[in-house]
Amino acid sequence: MSTQLPPQAPRKGNAITRWIGRRLLALLGWRADGELPNTPKLIVAAAPHTSNWDFILAMLVVLSLGLRASYLMKKEAFFWPFAGLFKWLGGVPVERRQSGGMVGSLTQWFNSQEKAWLLITPEGTRTKVEKYKTGFLRVAESANVPVILVAWDYPTKRVVLEKVWTLTGDHDKDCAAIRQYLTNRYQARQPQWQ
């Protein structure tokens, strides 16, 4: 894997965990391509998200890089025996029925961290959606954190670290543009749900 973790990125793990991540990715025939920005705080918007395999591949990339990353996951998934593993991998349980407050909470969380990278799937689910949710862009704007696009491309078996997206302040317009950009270039495991 040619992708390297930049100096300012939050780190976790050691040579053994990085080797395990790289080895498992290679055994699955996958690789990570692209560059990551050298910034201590970042929102990683990963799409198109249509399969549980997306999570496994993302965690293997995180492990292989030695990256300390957090991700939001429905609290119902944090049950024994997986709760400890999900938390160790950076999982943050979320109450999906809770309205409002998430942007403020995540902004405070970012502000309280010296280094923090947060992985978010803009769809908010693995099934087909008509449009991406705008919450990740509102958090990025509120916390003054850049957003990088990452895509799973199943035909080429790549997790593509695409580019830092320039935000316009129009969340609906940005979400539509990000969705079009990613779905025109990359194919999900379930392309009919893109």
Image (spheres, rainbow, N blue to C red):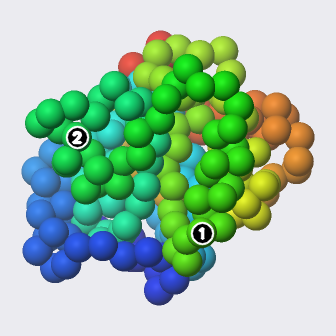
Residue 167 appearing in the image: yes
- Image quarter (top left, top right, bottom left or bottom right) of the N terminus: bottom left
Q: Tag 2's secondary structure? A: helix
Q: Is residue 38 left or right of residue 30?
A: right
Residue at the bottom extreme of this rendering: 7
Q: Mark 1 is on which residue type?
A: Ser
Q: Is residue 87 above or below residue 193?
A: below
Q: Residue at x 16, y 79 (%)?
A: 15
Whole-percent x and y of residue 89? Answer: 28, 54
Residue under pointer 1: 112
**161, 83: nearer the viewer:** 83
Residue 72, image x and y in percent?
Answer: 46, 42
Q: Which residue is mark 2?
A: 83
The image quarter containing residue 182 is top right
Label 2 vs 1, first from the N-terminus: 2
Provide residue 183's location: percent of width, then percent of height. 58, 31
Residue 163 falls left or right of residue 83: right
